[in-house]
Amino acid sequence: MLQLLTFLVEKLCLLSKFKLFESSWSDGVDHDRERYAQRGPTTPLRRGDLLEVPRTIFSHYGIYLGDNKVAHLIPDILPVLTNDKKLIGSVITNKRLILGCIYRCATVRVDTLEDFAYGSKILVNSMDKMMKNRALSNEEVAKGAEKLIGAFPYSLLWNNCEHFATYCRYGSAVSRQTEQFCECLKSIIRDQRSVIVTVLLGIISIVNFGMAPSTTLPIIFIPFTLWMAG
């Protein structure tokens, strides 16, 4: 039992480290290019710069358009519920964002630098040293972002804000956060203790809810799938 508890703690730690507090793209970043939105940038931002702001469990990305404006892809449920442009244009709350993720509805919108940063520090062009593709010219980057403004399909793993920003700046949609999450899932699946944990949870479910197709089939199918995948 101690081994199983250790396993669960270990995997939770892995999930908490999956770029959720600091982006691995920032390794080797020139810290002279770090800017703090609440204090104002020490050097003027350039139109076409790729901006990154750490959030609680992920980083958010956007493209600087100049004049204190940032284009960024962000989930939002309000466009599904109303056509009121003034309401939709207000700062997106966490509730709007989460419901947008669930409904897979997003927009590429333009906000002020302060609203985009939301009180967090800003990293500028932190991916330039990590990407295989060279960055496009800053004007090309900005114009590419402006062309995409409006409603946009959204997927947390396959079409998120990082995909948008890297596509605009490098011509290739990439998300390091997605890659890290998938690697974390692979490590969990490959660990055979996942099978044991799943079986134990299944047995607890049967004890609590009784034998039924809704409980029995997953108990058989999920551990078998994990065992084969591992």
Image (spheres, rainbow, N blue to C red):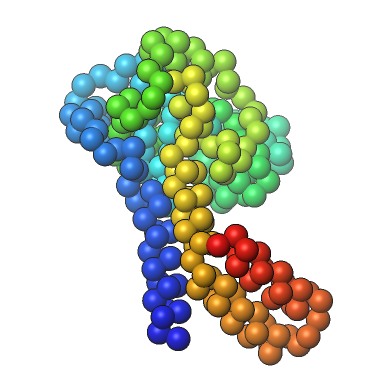
The residue sitting at 21% across, 21% down in the picture is: 43
The residue sitting at 69% across, 76% down in the picture is: 219
The front one of 18 and 188 is: 188
**Left or right side of 64 for 99:** right
Instruction: Find residue 135 and report its image quarter.
Output: top left
Instruction: Find residue 63 and report its image quarter.
Output: top left
The quarter of the picture where the N terminus appears is: bottom left
The front one of 99 and 142 is: 142
Q: Is residue 87 visible?
A: no
The answer to whether 179 is drawn above or below residue 142 in the figure is: below
Q: From this viewpoint, which residue is outermost toward the right?
A: 213
Q: How many dots with numbers?
A: 0
The front one of 196 and 121 is: 196
x, y (%) of residue 41? 24, 27
x, y (%) of residue 187? 47, 58
The front one of 24 and 150 is: 24
x, y (%) of residue 18? 40, 52
Q: From this viewpoint, which residue is outermost toward the bottom?
A: 207
The residue sitting at 40% across, 42% down in the picture is: 59
The answer to whether 26 is drawn above or below residue 218 in the figure is: above
x, y (%) of residue 222? 67, 68
Q: Is residue 135 visible?
A: yes
**Left or right side of 169 for 29:** left
The quarter of the picture where the C terminus appears is: bottom right
